[in-house]
Amino acid sequence: MQVYEAGTGIGGTWFWNRYPGARCDVESLAYSYEFSKDLEQEWNWTERYASQPEILKYANHVADRFDLRRDIALETRVESAVYDEASGRWTVRTDRGDEVTAQYCIMATGCLSARNTPDFPGIDRYRGQHFHTGDWPEEGVDLAGKRVGIIGTGSTAIQAIPILAEESGHLFVFQRTPNFSMPARNTPMDPEYQARVKANYPAFRKPFISGMFGLDFNPNDRIGATATDAERRAEFEARWAAGGLGVVGAFADLFVNPEVNEAAADFIRGQICETVADPEVAELLLPDTPVGCKRPCADTDYFETYNRENVTLVDIRKSPIEELTEGGLRVNGCEYDLDAIVFATGFDAMTGALLRIDIRGREGRTLQGKWAEGPKTFLGLGVESFPNLFTITGPGSPSVLANMIPAIEQHVNWIADCITYMSGRGLARIEATEEAETAWVAHVNEIAHRTIYPTCNSWYVGANIPGKPRIFTPYLGFPRYVKRCDEVAASGYEGFRLEP
Ligand code: NA7
């Protein structure tokens, strides 16, 4: 096995996203591997929601503990992967000039790893410091006394803004779309709670794995449509007080009934108005999309930060950023002098990392060509015309709508079992069939269209990248998905063509 990694270290998302305030909004004890019972027992998390440095430390611990580094080539970016039909092997080329062949090629390139820096006019002219949150300098950045601009108000910015406001002289937040955010209420880990979880880890993980999102939003079976206003409010309030993303689990129909969703949205808007002192600023911060339609965020003092003297919110919805200048940027004819600009502008999600590699399958077919109108996969694991290529948390799998670590483990286990099955039977080639792929893509869409998800401009539908085909790519329903994957494996990989 040979692993290639572009970074100077391992950890992926948690290696690159070192911006101030970076933190996971899934509970630490659940955002962890379960393949090793010893690992589960020996690692101690220090906070309810782990910070980026702690998760990176965990990833490094796992690499050392299981002696994984010897197979990993760091600072090596894969440029192309080409399938040769005659030999049945993939040839992988890297930016260091390596050229290796392999029977199987597994893309573990991540759902949110291809950074998006919008092509603002004048972007090359700007002379100040500038950073993308997904490539934050390892040594950190001294912003003391500086005038700093941050573009974007997604989950990343919502975590970074409170810290940047504390660290900088003045912070200007350039907001295109206001977002729903809920207080994380992060706390130091209670050692007794951690011990109780470790005493029966499988029982702790169960609700995470059986919930629709593979996450424990403490999902409520109750239907919101039949609850009174007072009952709804009580449920939202309890969840708001508990912290985390629980408000989106308040009622079983919150993602399918617009009226119930609107009640949750109204509740959160009310909280924002109560928190933000200046009514004009509060008004600008009120989201007008359904809750959860864009990725909901968990924060620490996000809305409170707008009460600081040194924070200015600039609405760029109606008047977009006109250009970057030598000394800052211009909006609506007004120039903002900035010593530093932070691009919290997200990622070319789900497909970006794969499509930035030149991947060629049978008959020279390119993945770029095949996915020109949107990604097509079977189970988000295999792609027709691309034999022996697997995608971990690929488009069409739950991935970003699940707890990523169990979602990744489920794919790794499925792929490992598949390869074992193949070699045990003298099989050399596996490829998704066109029929299975077409039916799966239709199924992913059909499920999504029963919900509020496709109704707003999120990265789930690719709306943040100009020109990207608008397709809802993640699969909704982690438990149903796992069952389907298990059935496919048990049936001898129905939906795939297996050949000697
Ligand atoms: P997101 O959620 O994609 O947020 C990016 C933000 O940047 C969002 O507020 C965008 O506004 C804004 N943006 C993007 N392009 C522009 C342009 N051209 N002009 C102005 N503003 C722009 O990325 P994050 O990094 O916050 O989070 C990604 C995921 O990582 C997160 O959901 C977690 O799952 C982990 P928009 O909303 O598109 O109007």
Image: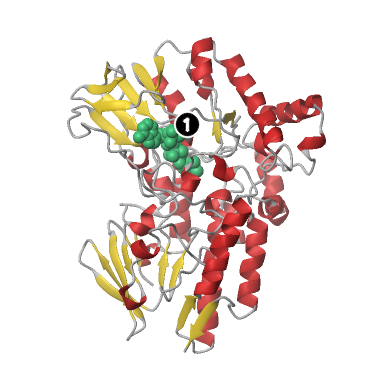
For ligand 1, give the image quadrant: top left
Tell me what residue is drawn at x 21 percent, y 62 percent.
96
- Left or right, residue 146 beside residue 290: left
Q: Nearer the viewer, residue 284 or 100?
A: 284
User: Where residue 275 appears, x then y in whole percent?
Assistant: 58, 16
The number of discs equals 1
- Left or right, residue 41 beside residue 350: right
- Left or right, residue 8 beside residue 246: left
Q: Which residue is mark 1?
A: 159
Residue 195 vs 153, above or below: the answer is below
Q: Nearer the viewer, residue 405 or 203?
A: 405
User: Where residue 361 appears, x then y in whole percent?
Assistant: 36, 73
| Residue type beneath disc 1 | Gln
Q: Nearer the viewer, residue 105 or 270?
A: 270
User: Where residue 330 appears, x then y in whole percent?
Assistant: 27, 21
Tell me what residue is drawn at x 23 percent, y 68 percent.
98
Q: Secondary structure at mark 1?
A: helix
